[in-house]
Image: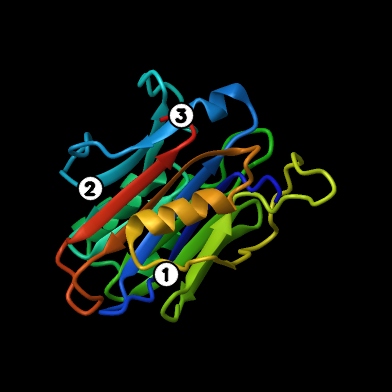
Amino acid sequence: MVYLGRVLGVGITDSYDDCEPTLVYAVSGRSQPSRERKATVPDAHRAYKSYDTVHIGPLDGSDDDPLRHYDAIMLTDGIGVVSSGQHTNEIMRQLTDTTKKSEMVLRNVLSEFGYEPDEYHTPRIAGIVENDGFYLGMVSENGVDIAMILPKPGDIFSITTYVGSDEENEKIIIPNALTIMRLPSDFDYVNGIANQLYEWMDKDFVVCVSAATYFGGSASFNNEWSVDVKNLHE
């Protein structure tokens, strides 16, 4: 494996009873501040409404770095959002407070936020699961790139902030465009998906993973989400 930075994906499970919409998110890190983080599921979202969330934060709970500490997954009434930073909140706000379609929201928010203000100009990435489709998007120095995803049962498709190097596994390489890959997904329940993603990540870099799966059938969204996280630092 190589250093991929942050990984997120959207797809559906291959369930015996039904195919369930799924979101996944994984964090890897090289530096000590990046590795001293964990994924948690707060009781309620802190900003403006009550949502099921997965928060990426420091071990001491201080939340003092907006590039490292943010809500990575937000879930409500038939909508799931996953992203690599604070744009998660704005994507969810526009999906729930406006009539804009998912693709437009994703494009607008990524354009507004732009790539991250670090020395690498790290892309911001995001995904949406909603009634009107599954979407993945990225904003980099080359602009915004959006793709509608059409997963089959058992498919989870992902994007990453970095693409890695087989020769230098710690090297940071920025993708030039949206590079979509299929993640291993042999489970139809959320903790199995989270555990498999954790095992798939490079052991030298993995920090935490999270997964969210909708239960009740893809044709009848009603906010029945199940969430699981797995952390290097439990």
Type of residue at label 3? His
Instruction: Please tell me whether residue 63 is drawn above or below residue 177 in the rendered image.
Output: above
Q: Position of residue 75 (x, y in %)?
A: 25, 54
Are discs 3 and 1 less than 8 Å apart at CB? no
Q: Which residue in the protein does label 2 denote?
A: 52
Residue designated by label 1: 11
Q: Nearer the viewer, mark 3 or mark 1?
A: 3
Q: Earlier in the sequence, mark 2 or mark 3?
A: 2
| Residue 215 marker | none
Could you give the CA–CA distance between mark 2 and mark 3, rounded to whole angstroms? Answer: 22 Å
- Rendered location of residue 234, percent (x, y): 40, 30
Circle 1: residue type: Gly
On residue 233, the disc is: 3
Q: Quadrant of residue 70?
A: top left
What residue is rendered at 26% in x and 51% in y?
Answer: 93
Q: Secondary structure at mark 3?
A: loop
- Measured as percent of width and height from the top left, residue 16 is found at 31, 79
Up the image or down, 116 lies above or below 184; here it is above
Q: How is the image coloured?
A: rainbow
For marks 3 and 1, give the CA distance: 27 Å
Element assignment for label 1: strand
Residue 79 seen by the camera: yes
Q: Earlier in the sequence, mark 2 or mark 1?
A: 1
Compared across the picture, whether 133 is left or right of 171 comes to left
The residue at 37%/44% (across/down) is 229
- Contact? badges 2 and 3 (CB < 8 Å): no
